[in-house]
Image (spheres, rainbow, N blue to C red):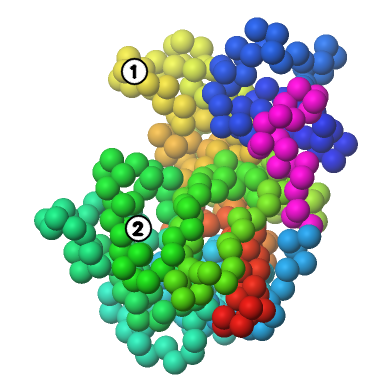
Amino acid sequence: MYQTKQQSDFFSAKMLADILSLPKKSIESRINKGILVPCPDTGLFHKDQVIHHKEIQSLYESKWKQELKITPNRTYNLVELFAGCGGLALGLEQAGFKSILLNEVDKHACNTLRYNRPDWNVVESDIADVDFTLIQDNVDVLTGGFPCQTFSYAGNRMGFEDTRGTLFFEMARAIKELQPKVFLAENVRALLTHENGRTLNIIKDVIDKLGYHLVTPKVCRAMFYKVPQKRERLILIGIRKDLSNNSDFIWPSPYSRIMTVKDAFKAGELYETDVNKSRGQKYPERKREIMSHVPQGGYWRDLGIDLQKEYMKGSFYLGGGKTGMARRLSMSEPSLTLTCTPAQKQTERCHPLETRPLQIREYARIQTFPDSWEFQGPITSIYKQIGNAVPVNMAAALGRSLVKLLNDMETRGAG
């Protein structure tokens, strides 16, 4: 059971594993060794047993409420690349930024942006065709989540031009042409180790040559930022070198508790009402029958042996945990990272209580989109748009940290 307002001092074994980024077996080992002692009546662990962990401390020392009061000293202009359906842009809007240009190549995502924010300047185009020199306004922040690509290693030293042909090159070109005070780039955690770390080293080198100081990159875990999901994103923050001595970027404080699927679907802290029924994919009848035997929080190994073999087919005899297969979410935990296809066999996202894939509005709530945010396009595109988005609440938390950074620059006369 996850913590609530009334139970914030107690943690389940699964909760501890998630918060501490440990396998559940590691927690079980500590229990077996007597390092962790569960309460006899509930099986939960009091905070006093785990408060020495910095992740637990951060929940009790949360400055979230204070940071909510951060507002811009003036209007800060935002340009966003690879904007998708607007998760990052919406969160930054909530933090106080004004979007002056959003670039996205997918037509359905662009239609979603235009439908919800008719006043936004949405440029539907391949980023390589966008001339950023036409933007007359000063750009305070440039953001974007460029796809992680393998770079060519032809030269001895990778420079800006050597990344040509990659989408990172296009983001670097936008930074070079717009000279924003700050940029935020987000990517998958795997970028840390992509090509044995060479890709990130190339990116760092290019950022340095563009004239920006790179804040030590951080993997932000959405579940710490009032998002009911275990999603992780690598965040890169760059500050223009002529401004970098005037202020420090301070990462946002975690929220005071961990949100769960129940928080997403039921009225409470996150939403005022229960989630509405909406469109969604459906299972074939036999798959639905098999999935009906999977318990909350369970997956294919929780099925009987005959059903395991039927469902997994040849994969049953292969190695690996394949923990995403036949996976049912739990109401009392954050959701697994949402994918672009909730009914795909490899990345199953079954509703906790009903035997069906998550519906569109459920998907959107797990990403903390407001219920008023309407998605455009066919259902497969909508799942993809939501699944690829930056969670809105995490984006807003990062946005407030960016606002504070820019406010500090203004206060110290660096703006």
Q: Which residues are magenta?
A: 46-65
- Rate crowding at label 2 as few (under 14), some (14 to 19) or many (20 or more) other CA atoms within 10 Å: some
Three-letter code for the amino acid on which mark 2 is drawn: Lys
The residue to which callout 2 is attached is: 204
Instruction: Identify the residue at image location x=31%, y=60%.
Output: 205
Task: Give the residue pinned by disc 1.
Answer: 319
| Crowd rating for badge 1 (residues with CA inside 10 Å; few <14, some 14–19, many 20+) | few
The spot of residue 320 in percent (x, y) is: 37, 21
Q: Does dot 2 land on a helix, a strand or a loop?
A: helix
Q: Secondary structure at mark 1?
A: loop
Q: Seen in the image, is 47 located left or right of residue 365?
A: right
**Residue furthest right as drawn:** 6
Question: Is 54 included in the stretch rendered in magenta?
Answer: yes
Percent position (x, y) of residue 289? Answer: 53, 26
Question: Which SS type dominates the magenta stretch?
Answer: helix
User: Is 412 on the left or on the right of 80, as rendered?
Assistant: right
| Residue at 43% from the left image edge and 45% from the top image edge | 189
* Residue 359: mark in rendering: none
Q: Is residue 67 left or right of residue 160?
A: right
Vertical relation: 45 (above or below) 216:
above
Q: Is residue 395 visible?
A: yes
Q: Quadrant of residue 248?
A: bottom right
Q: Nearer the viewer, mark 2 or mark 1?
A: 2
Q: Is residue 134 above or below residue 81?
A: below
Q: Amino acid at mark 1?
A: Gly
**Residues under labels 2 and 1: Cα distance?**
37 Å
Q: Is residue 227 magenta?
A: no
Q: Is residue 144 visible?
A: no
